[in-house]
Image (cartoon, rainbow, N blue to C red):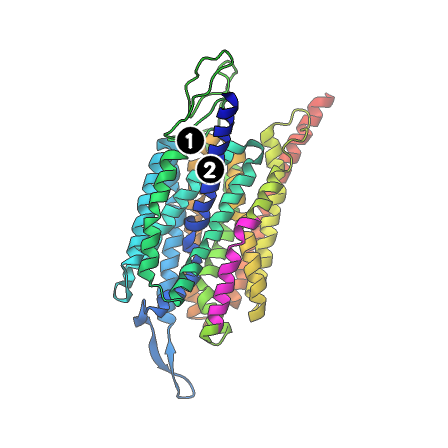
Amino acid sequence: MNGFQCDGVTVRRGLTFATGLVECLCFAGAVFGWASLVFVLKTDGYFGSGCVNVTNSNATQALDCSGQDEKFSLVFTIASFMNNFLTLPSGFLFDHFGTTVARLVGICLYTSGTLMVGFSNAALSFMLFPALSFLATGGVMFLITNMQVGNLFGSRRSTIITLYNGAFDSSSALFLVIKLLHEAGFSLRSCFIFLSACSVVHLLRTFFLLPRRHIPYTLPDGYTYGYIQGIPPTTTNGNVQPASEEKPLNMDLPVKPEKTFAECLKSRFFVLQLLWLSIMQLRHYLFIGTLNPMLQRLTAGEPSLVSQYINAFAITQLCGVLCAPWNGLIMDRHKGRTRAPGESEQEADLRASVLSLFLTSLQCVAFSLCASIPYLPLQYLTFVLQVLNRSFLYGGNAAFISVAFPSCHFGKLYGSVLALSAVLSVLQYPCFALVNGPLNGNPLYVNIALTLFSLLTFIHPLSVFLHCRSLASGRARSTYS
């Protein structure tokens, strides 16, 4: 009987992990495939009034679509802002009301967004503004509620968290699939109505493969979850022990007081994590939001060439799910090893995060440098560095918050750091306006400024390294005293 129970728990956890990965991979971060969807929307005439005939210096007529590009850039700016800013109330919702309530809200938002895009048209282009914001907010709620699945896998916790974040990044390829289907004759409406119908799957996962509240870390013995609890675990004397979603490990052990949410917000680690995330996120958002006009400029407006590079960009996004676990493995590499005398697991996790934070900053600088060089073939390398850095960035952000702060505040802190970073991400729109206006479409100076700005991100890994070294020195002194 006990073997059957263990097999049942293993199967359920495996299904929870696998279906969560599919959910993040196929739905959660679709909004970041914006460049592929823009190509379809332009074909269907969305914001077509932004294209006007102009007379060139050589007296020839040309079509200027900078107004259309600006509208599309504004849609993405608002959606990406909402993706981050509304993560704060989403985190509070998750922490206070649990998984089921948070997911039901997320499913409603996501389904509303897909239906709004599905029933929009060129005459109703304005519907893209709320639709993309709903898609972004609903998608990030899928991610938040799935990241706790890492708690089921103990020593591979950071790897699972980063893997889900990588799947979130890779889901931007969903809009590439829609672009290819559109080119094959499928309408935009039929594609998005199908996505709406997939909400049934999200509901089934919510009720049968996820807890009503939260998955605790570390897991108590006999932990189970879901509305169908299965066979209750038994104690060693054969008595039935009730299934429980949350149970303390040992009530007799003294509980170490946790930091309050306010103390976490005021801590140096949180402030530097916010700076680290905000700068790199702004760089990525501006790149994604301006990719289409940048390719138009570098290809001299050749539609087939623009389509080729957009497809290449979208395909590289699929690799996010392959790149992100590398970061998790870097953070989990100390698991199972003997720790230094007196070193806590949290200190070991922090020490392991230094390399992850440093590599992420280094990747961002390399990506920004390549994006700054106006050479078309080089953009293939830019795409690779972008998806590598983005998968490290968001996975590393979630993993660092999970190890540096109490787990009871994870949803709130994760939401807070993304919401506050959204304020800086709004700068992408004035940057786009600056490039489109005074700089006459040449983004070189803005790219150089952002590359220099990215160097500030190295402050965070240096700070964590110095903190860990200080802790190690303190232990060494106490040992010899």
Toward which corner of the image does residue 63 lie, by quadrant? bottom left
Instruction: Tell which residue pokes out farthest to the top in this image.
Output: 237
Q: Position of residue 137 (x, y in %)?
A: 37, 47
Toward which corner of the image does residue 66 lie, by quadrant? bottom left
Q: Earlier in the sequence, mark 2 or mark 1?
A: 2
Q: How many marks?
A: 2
Instruction: Tell which residue pokes out farthest to the left in this image.
Output: 123
Q: Where does the magenta region start and end?
A: 305-323
The CA distance from mark 2 to mark 1 is 17 Å
Q: Residue at x 57, y 64 (%)?
A: 380
Q: Residue at x 32, y 69 (%)?
A: 45
Question: Which amino acid type corresponds to the residue marked 1 in the rendered image?
Answer: His
Q: Nearer the viewer, residue 239 or 417?
A: 239
Q: Is residue 353 visible?
A: no
Q: Is residue 13 magenta?
A: no
Q: Nearer the viewer, residue 392 or 89?
A: 392
Q: Position of residue 53 (x, y in %)?
A: 34, 80
Per the image, the residue denoted by label 1 is 214
Eyeballing the image, is 180 above or below 111?
below
Per the image, the residue denoted by label 2 is 15
Question: Which amino acid type corresponds to the residue marked 2 in the rendered image?
Answer: Leu
Q: Secondary structure at mark 2?
A: helix
Q: Is residue 311 magenta?
A: yes
Q: Is residue 301 left or right of residue 476?
A: left
Eyeballing the image, is 374 above or below 140?
below
Q: Position of residue 204 (x, y in %)?
A: 36, 39
Q: Residues within 10 Å of mark 1 (few under 14, many from 20)?
A: many
Q: Secondary structure at mark 1?
A: loop
